Amino acid sequence: MEQPYVYAYPPGTAPPPPQSGGIAGGIVDQRFCAPYPVDLAIVRKMMKLTDGNFVITDVNGNLLFKVKEPVFGLHDKRILLDGSGSPVLTLREKMVSLHDRWQVFRGGSTEQRDLLYTVKRSSMLQFKTKLDVFLSHNKEEKRCDFRVKGSWFERSCVVYAGESDAIVAQMHKKHTVQSVFLGKDNFSVTVYPNVDYAFIASLLVILDDVNREDRAAGSS
């Protein structure tokens, strides 16, 4: 089956690959990597309570991923499905943790042998969300492998390689009168060349979860 890669820039105008040495390539699967920038379009249906309220497509509207949320309002686990409905990643929040912490597993598994990476807040007190990502082999977690800095409210998000300034993905707001009227939150994310876009998609889901929890805490 042909992979749904899309060009985010006209040929010959793409930015150079990030200086991460391809570290973000093939974290989930090599099939989610492209040698050119990929644009992900995210639609978050704010009023929908059933699963599938978080949908990721290419710029032509072809479904790449959707999020299956747990039933009965339990928000400690989400499953990232591909366009055919097969599980790509399972995201599990560790409820008993000093810092908010998520573990991301391959496919539909939650077994430690299938752990790919861990995501946690860099600190408890934050004005803007900052997440640190540790790949499974980084047991000591002294230095992060990736950083996420962003605010869902401001529709601003950047993913960096390690503690460097090398960007591997960044968010762009897509705001239209129609999207507001339909109760949808639309934005796009440009994933840089050779970066695993399923990996980036999972970070966006976690960022959304963090910001929803923050809003709920702030309104209580």
Image (tube, rainbow, N blue to C red):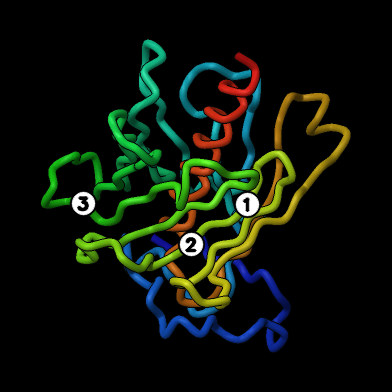
Is disc 3 placed on a helix, strand or loop?
A: strand
Nearer the viewer's eye, disc 3 or disc 1? Answer: 1
Residue appearing at x 25%, y 47% in the figure: 105
Rounded to the nearest angstrom, the CA distance separating label 3 from label 1 is 25 Å
Q: Is residue 48 left or right of residue 72?
A: right
Q: Is residue 123 left or right of residue 179?
A: left
Residue appearing at x 65%, y 42% in the figure: 152
The amino acid at mark 3 is Leu
Is disc 2 placed on a helix, strand or loop?
A: strand
Residue 175 place in picture, x, y as percent: 81, 42
Instruction: Tell me which label, 3 or 1, sits earlier in the chain.
Output: 3
Numbered label attached to residue 115: 3
Numbered label attached to residue 4: none
What residue is disc 2 on?
147
What residue is disc 1 on?
150
The amino acid at mark 1 is Gly
Q: Is residue 143 visible?
A: yes
Residue appearing at x 54%, y 42% in the figure: 125
Residue 197 place in picture, x, y as percent: 47, 61
The amino acid at mark 2 is Arg
